Image (cartoon, rainbow, N blue to C red):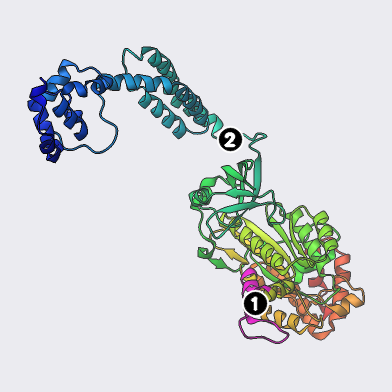
Amino acid sequence: MTNTYQLDEAILRTKKVVELREIARAFGIPYYQKLKKAELLEALINGPQAVAGKETEKGPETPETAEAGEGEQPAAPRKRGRPRKTPVAAEQAATEDRKEEKKPEEEETSQAMQVAEESREGSEEAALDSETAESADTEAGKETDKSKQSAAAVSEDTPKEAQEVKHVKRVYQPSEDRPEVEGILEIADGGFGFLRFHNFLTSDQDVYVSPSQIRRFNLKTGDKIKGISRKPNEGEKFGAILYVKEVNGDEPGVAMRRPDFDELTPIFPNERIFLENGSTELSMRLIDLVAPIGKGQRGLIVAPPKAGKTVLLKKIASSIEKMYPDIELIVLLVDERPEEVTDMQRSIKGEVIYSTFDEMPSNHVKVAEMVLARAQRLVEHGKDVVILLDSITRLARAYNLVIPPTGRTLSGGLDPGALHKPKKFFGAARKLEEGGSITILATALIETGSRMDDVIFEEFKGTGNMELHLDRKLSEKRIFPAINLNKSGTRREDLLMSQEELEAIWYMRRALANVGVQEVTETIIDYLAHTKSNADFIQLIRKTRLELD
């Protein structure tokens, strides 16, 4: 036998693996297709017993394997790596692998059930993994298969349970680990966002909103999001929103279908806001007469220092809150005194957004832009919003400090580019044909001794469609409300007032042309004090028009 296999070693080493396997096949060497070149050389030179020990480790040869091996064509050279196992060897290895993986599979099953409570997709993936893992079924692994079958039975039922859980727990009921949050969304440049809570400014309590949620629900800066969040994980600074329940008080689907603010059609205000609330407050009744306010009005309250503009704003806010609880009221105080902020917060129940004079100008700008975005989002949902701004002069000053310089300077040191954003804010006030409105009443400072303030007022003078002027001389004589009836008025007031009211106002303005402002104002205030309502006052004016003349 030895002589049969002894060949010229030098000639054999020059041959390729395919040629060596042909020679080994001719000599009847078993497992020749699985042998490498070195093993083939050793078998041909020293006989098959030299590699018999190695082949025994690979598994005993079955008749089927031997017949298949003899009838097969020479295989191409195999790549480096683990040699292919025989069916029996593979079966034994699979059994050993399943025994080793028994515990991880049970852990995956329990984890899959836990994920199933969160979403249906997770449960289906877990069930798929369990079914794939039990594909082999051999006698050697029967005990392992029994435990796997029981785990698979649990996994097969998991999707049905997950469907039931989805209807119950998909709502994400609030808990200690998943608190319910409600805040205003601010979207960053990267497409993600944060829910802001206090004063629309950054804080440690902010909640992260992912870009996928923003795209899915068509969310924008200024949206009020209500939903379930999770606490921050280890290494995270902020929590994250898990489930969006409401967007601006409506279902999330409404936000997905809403129009864009810039695409809506502005029209003249034709729906009136009455400030007369049945109280003895004469200033509200006088405003209703000389400068009526409609939904979508763009009003400018022009006032010198100490003329009572802040008090007037507070009374307007209280009156709107009492008469129109469905209107979203936002009071924006920019560069204001802290005690004025506290007084306003305690006077009204609406939102008071502020940035005091001791804060950076960038804060003034940010809160103003967030308030504008908030109002626009509400209008896109068809709601009416009233913004009371004190003051637009200080807002323009803040923009003058934060914008990049344009290289030109107006009188008083005002950069022309600083007026663009305040005008955009003020110009957002409008009545929309499709529904909804933004009403802005902003104060403008005059007679402050600053040339910049005068320039700002001149720039905004023609942009509003309603003006209310407060007179310093009247306030110095302690005549309140110190409203200059001659300069105050509303454009297209015929859309807001009845014919009787228009006639009464005509008589009043006719009297102003003949008599001084102070005398007429005192007379009108006296008439207001002796009547219970504006309707009675109008009837009185129509009867006594000759006396006013």
Q: Is residue 454 positioned above or below 12 on the image? A: below
Q: Amino acid at mark 2?
A: Tyr
Q: Position of residue 474 (x, y in %)?
A: 88, 77
In the image, 94 versus 423, the foreground residue is 94
Q: CA distance from mark 2 to mark 1?
A: 46 Å
Question: Label 2 crowding class (10 Å Cα cut-off): few <14, some 14-19, many 20+?
Answer: some
At x 75%, y 76%, the residue is 488
Q: Secondary structure at mark 2?
A: loop
**Image quadrant containing the C terminus:** bottom right
Q: Which residue is mark 1?
A: 419
Q: 328 or 239, which lies in front?
A: 239
Residue type, mark 1 in image: Leu
Residue 421 highlighted magenta (yes or no):
yes
Q: Which span of residues is magenta-colored?
A: 402-425
Rendered image: mark on residue 234: none
Left or right, residue 157 beside residue 444: left
Tell me, for residue 172, which label it has, or none. Answer: 2
